Image: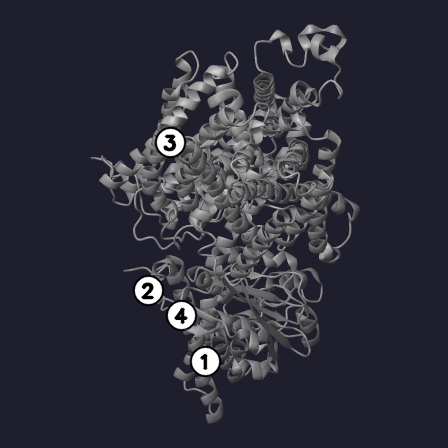
Amino acid sequence: MLTFNTLVGVCLLYVIMLFVVAFVADKRARRSKVRFLTSPMIYTLSLSVYCTAWTFYGAVGNAARSGLEYVTIYLGPTLVMIGWWWFLRKLVRVGRSQRVTSIADLVSSRYGKSNLLGVLVTLIAVIGTTPYIALQLQSVTLSFAVFARDRSAGWVIPDLEQTAIWVAGGLALFTILFGTRNLDVNERHHGVVTAIAVEAVVKLVALMAVGIFVVWGIGGGAQGISAAMEQAIQAAPEGAWSLQGGRWVGLTFLSAAAFLTLPRMFQVLVVENVDERQLATASWAFPLYLFLMSLFVIPIAVVGLAILPKGENPDLFVLTLPLYFEQDGLAMLAFLGGFSSATSMVIVASIALATMVSNHIIMPIWLSTRLGVGASEYRDARQILLSARRLSIVGILALGYFYYRISGGGAALAAIGLISFAGVAQVLPAMAGGLFWRGASRSGAVAGLITGFAIWAYTLFLPSFGEAGVMSAAMLADGPWGIAALRPQALFGVDGLDPVVHALFWSLILNCAVFVLISLLSFPSPLERLQAAQFVNVLDHSGPTRGRSFNAATSEDLLVMAQQIMGSDQAQAWFQAQAEQQGKQGYLPDTTPDFIGRLERELSGLVGTATAHAMIAQILGGATVSVDDLLAVADETQQMLEQTSQMEAKQLELTTTARQLSEVNEKLTQLSIQKDAFLSQISHELRTPMTSIRAFSEILRDGGADDPEAAARHASIIHDESVRLTRLLDDLLDLSVLENGQVQLYPRREVVRDVLDRAIAATSSVIDQEKMHIHRNRSDEGIALYTDTDRLAQVFINLISNAAKYCDAKDKRLAIRVRQRGGRLQVDFVDNGSGVPLESQSMIFEKFSRLSDQAAAGGAGLGLAICREIMDKLDGSITYLPGQSGAAFRVTLPIGTHSPFGRTSSLGINHL
Amino acid sequence: MTRQVLVIEDEPNIAEAISFILSRDGWSVSTHASGTTAVQAVRDAKPDVLILDVMLPGKSGYDILQDLRSADDTRALPVLMLTARGQKTDRELAERLGVNRFMTKPFSNSEMLTNLRELVGG
Amino acid sequence: MRSPREPLFLARQSYRRRRIEDAARLLPLLGVVLFLLPLMVGGAIGSVRVAFVFSSWFFLILSAFVLARHLGRDAGQRPTGSQSAPDGPSDDPAGPR
């Protein structure tokens, strides 16, 4: 016999188990054992936050009332998942490449990083989700109540509100503990996701166990179920089991839309996604999960209808059937299934909402209160952000709890599921439009969202409070001020539709219409257009493409670009003529400097010098902005210039736009100037040592110094300078080999401490000479690496000798800190000098970007460029850390697997 | 009387080479390595001829030349410019600023001597 | 003189892959059609239609499984999956992670 204490005890044990699972997963993640945690199966299971208590219990109730219709809630997501190749894949790619933290962030980022949109989507999400959280609290308390009623002899159910508040509090604690542990959104919430995956299994097992018990335990197998179903259809009210086309299509579409736009779904689908393989697996595995979740729903419903007394709430058949047959264990399992469904939804939803609220509402307000303070004042921002997240979680759960208290539970709340879906679905036009249509603009998105949201509130949300709520019965029946066309549930006289479908139809149709219309009419800012290009074309040019070297710059790329600007025929004819001059056939001449110069001139006539130069430099240099983006900008520059002459009226707007564009242009021009400077620098760096060599060798040739000591000194200068020349050539060669990727790596296992020891030993002469003190914490350095440690040591040597040479403190000190963060090794080199000035920080990794002309320091300015290339090859990175006590560099790289095999290919070895 | 020459060059080895060549030819040579204080050094040393590098720490040779040409006492000072960036544009700029001779590194010792002698009217 | 630009036919493998991508794009459309079919018959739902919905559902899952096995193999390695001709041995560290 189940007592209340057993029930609570099992519940507590279950929660403790979840804590342990989350804790262990988080710990593994921090020890970088993420292979299991990021497996496609965990990802698939985490998607099951879609199945809340509303679907766990409610599906059976729905099936008992209206037959097959309940599957629409699962069919929508199924269609979305199996159609991943053209929608989800793009969404996830954008999410990763733009570092998106939430659906509000996605929309805001797409439309020119507009915070207004972020706030708008956040508000819609909060309003749509809060009642949903209340619904979960209700389902947990209701399921407690079922046990209380059926076992009234044994125990009295304590106050239901008491239960709800305990549940809400526990969930807040769990979410804060595991949801706000780290801030970096790239470090995903492994603990939470794993716990959710466990809950997903519990849900599925529970529902299937009840199903199997019902079908083969009491229902008499498939035949019996079939009979019970016919009987249920006979007994049902007229038309209950017939499919209503509007609802069938409408609800399928609604669930598909909500699957993409619900904040919690976006969190698990996009934010927690690690790679595309997860998506590929989930594309079939998640529909399978949904399939299994719904397989036994009809049997449970029809058997419940046949066996249980009339008037029993069908929403709780999953619990009451096992209890009726005194299957306490099974009932317990079913209870845990429902409990899991409720808790997992609440946890993920509050994490997602808290991220949105803190990023789009709290932080902007906080920042605006400290306008005009220096960068150093933002040190506590991280702490503020964490506190904001935690407060938001508590706030959201409190909101859900009060909603539950105020609505008083009951049927009104049960209907909120679909209402909530329809509310968040309003984000779909802005989101889908933003991903597929470059013309979608910020004004359009804002107007569409507001329109859709307002209509949703008017036709569905407000009426859902019933007559006692905001809208009177008279208003519902006759419309406001007796205007029939404005009746909330029969807008413009459309009264043949189910209320949910009606609201969905009008809100989305008008949302889309306004969104498209305003987008067509408005004129987006350059930033918005750049973002639009990056979002819409994300599949064409994302991925790790950086540092295209000069040789690899194909004339094909140049031809593609020239065609866009000069027109296909003209460009092809011109290229062909150029190729012919070089004695080649076809359309693709060699990219000689001469050819490039001529092409640049040719293009300058059409797009202006700076742009043409920047475009070509871009293709040859290969920077982060893709060629396509450049084309888009350049293309539109021209159109804009034409418009200036035509429309004097728009002058002001255009001036601002032009200024923004010129900023973009300036940046591009700077890049190309760098390219020119590179050649000039090479010349300078080679000629300088050669000058000494030539001068002194001529002196020697002409008889040399009379003083033998001076003569010896002259010879040694010649020697030193030739060594310097050789070193420069070595560096250049090293760099070009690295840049062309023709480098062979020799990975092996070594402890970081040994690599650092070697690097310091190699630099001991310069360290001694400059009297620099090195601080290390050797106990932190015992991390074993599997990588090309000789190359890594080369990077370390560079950084250490740079610190020795350039640190301008009187008493030079260099701190080397080693850390391990999630599978990656971090080594920081921080000195106590004055650091690198802000304006130079972005340039120091470029070739020959020595800050001052301290030729005396001996290097050619290639060191950091080489370091960057090496780290690139080692799959890691080197960055400048601003805001430290002095110059600070961070080297990050994967620790690597221990196996000497299997890893090699991903280390980028070229098998030539 | 020995001729005075001032060498403004930040690469110590090159400065040493020039000093040696010129001293052996009978010049009185002084050197200076910084761009910032170069103009003052010219005023102090009052050389008969100046050898000026382009890439100098602090202030470029072009700027120094411009300053010299705009002051009365140094306007007529013969200047031989040395640069390692021997592009056409560099030479043109130097000529616009009023340089007397322009040589690209690496240079031939004898050519430099010839140039210098011509400059002081030897 | 024939331009060396335009390859007359793609390598067999990449041709196959593009057709699989086409299939992946079409699968949700097939799903929509299958799920609309039960509406074409009037009256109350019997076991037949329930069985139809569930079996077409299962068929879609199976198809998605087969397609995902082909698509997912490269999705993890090559982010674009575009039909660019193989550009020599790739030096990029494989794929996003």
Residue at left offset 37%, top offset 25%? C51
From mark 1 to mark 3, how far is it between C-alphas?
93 Å
Q: Position of residue A92 (x, y in %)?
A: 49, 41
From mark 2 to mark 3, how far is it between C-alphas?
53 Å
Residue A392 position (above or below residue A135): below
* Chain letter of the residue beneath label 2 in the structure image: A
Residue at left offset 70%, top offset 9%? A477
Q: Disc 2 or 1, which lies upstream in sequence?
A: 1
Cβ atoms under marks 2 and 1 closer than 8 Å: no
Residue A834 position (above or below residue A615): below
Characterize the local packing of mark 1: few (<14), some (14-19) or many (20 or more) Cα atoms within 10 angstroms. Answer: some
Q: Which numbered tag is attached to residue A221?
A: 3
Q: Disc 1 or 3, which lies upstream in sequence?
A: 3
Q: Which numbered tag is attached to residue A901?
A: 2
Q: Which residue is mark 4?
A: A730
Instruction: Give the amino acid at mark 3.
Output: Gly
Residue at left offset 34%, top offset 59%? A905
Q: Disc 2 or 3, which lies upstream in sequence?
A: 3
Q: Nearer the viewer, residue A137 or A257?
A: A137
Corner quadrant of residue A132: top right
Report the mark closest to the observer, 1 or 3: 3
Q: Which numbered tag is attached to residue A720?
A: 1
